[in-house]
Image (cartoon, rainbow, N blue to C red):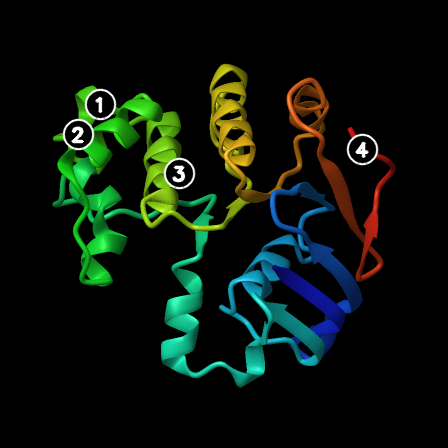
């Protein structure tokens, strides 16, 4: 599904990631850890072709990223939902319109009931008409998750999704991600929160990847 073969990425003249080889298999759940500045966000960007490797190969759905045209990249990204730590919204549009924005960009429409069900699933049904500036940090993250899955992607990438919320909301977001994984979605969560990873062991068979000395290592057995 997503594969790295000896991949590397240079930034500012120095190598940030080096000789990365791993597979994110369909239906798997991974956490990615490492100190600030170690390259977690860069790794995620390589996973959805926001960045191209400066060495080695990255393959998305059996296609090497360097071979993809701009249109190919756009189509590939429809299969990958991304939740950014600093989630951005169009503040003049209500939550419902922000969540369905990927459909709008793709020229697609979905049944109103599907949107209603999705907003209810993330606990934002009553806030469908609210504007983003009125949302709390946890509500923004749940809206970002809903937007990431509106296209029915195969893979969900989340960059520090619990970094700006309290513990109770962190657990709620984790539960949503676990539910997506049980639906067959591949999940990769970049996080500093080791407590969150420990909590996950009761809910999902996850693997932990750790960035150390520019390389990504498997940090122990199944959690």
Q: Residues within 10 Å of mark 1 (few under 14, many from 20)?
A: some
Residues under numbered marks 1 and 4 in contact, where contact means CB atoms less than 8 Å apart: no
Q: Left or right: where does residue 101 sit relative to residue 80?
A: left
In the rendered structure, are the residues bearing label 1 and label 2 in contact, judged by CB atoms less than 8 Å apart? Answer: yes
Report the Cα–Cα distance between label 1 and label 2: 6 Å
Does residue 127 show up?
yes
The residue beneath circle 2 is: 128
Query: Looking at the picture, does residue 218 appear above or below residue 127?
Result: below
Query: Which residue is denoted by mark 3 in the rendering?
Result: 145
Secondary element under disc 4, as helix, strand or loop, is loop
Q: Are marks 4 and 2 in contact (CB under 8 Å)?
A: no
* For residue 12, above or below residue 191: below
Front one among 79 and 96:
79
Instruction: Tell me if mark 4 has few (under 14), some (14-19) or many (20+) residues whose alpha carbon lies within 10 angstroms of its own.
Output: few
On screen, 84 above or below 73?
A: above
Q: Classify 10 Å Cα crowding around label 2: few (below 14), some (14-19), many (20 and above).
A: some
Indicate the quadrant where residue 130 lies: top left
Q: Earlier in the sequence, mark 3 or mark 2?
A: 2
Closer to the camera in the image, 222 or 32:
222
């Amino acid at each position: 599904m997503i594969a790295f073969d000896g991949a590397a990425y240079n930034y500012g003249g120095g190598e940030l990631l080096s000789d990365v080889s791993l597979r994110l298999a369909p239906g798997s759940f991974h956490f990615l850890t490492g100190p600030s500045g170690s390259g977690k966000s860069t790794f995620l960007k390589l996973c959805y072709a926001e960045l191209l490797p400066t060495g080695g190969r990255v393959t998305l759905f059996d296609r090497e990223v360097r071979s993809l045209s701009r249109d190919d990249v756009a189509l590939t990204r429809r299969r990958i939902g991304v939740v950014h730590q600093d989630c951005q919204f169009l503040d003049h549009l209500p939550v419902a319109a922000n969540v369905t924005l990927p459909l709008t960009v793709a020229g697609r429409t979905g049944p109103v009931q599907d949107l209603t069900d999705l907003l209810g699933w993330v606990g934002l049904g009553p806030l469908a008409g609210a504007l983003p500036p009125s949302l709390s940090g946890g509500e923004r993250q749940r809206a970002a998750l809903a937007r990431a899955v509106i296209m029915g992607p195969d893979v969900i990438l989340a960059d520090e999704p619990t970094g700006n919320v309290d513990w109770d909301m962190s657990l709620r977001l984790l539960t949503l991600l676990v539910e997506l994984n049980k639906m067959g979605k591949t999940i990769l969560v970049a996080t500093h929160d080791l407590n969150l990873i420990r909590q996950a062991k009761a809910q999902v068979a996850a693997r932990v990847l750790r960035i150390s000395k520019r390389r990504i290592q498997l940090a122990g057995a199944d959690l």
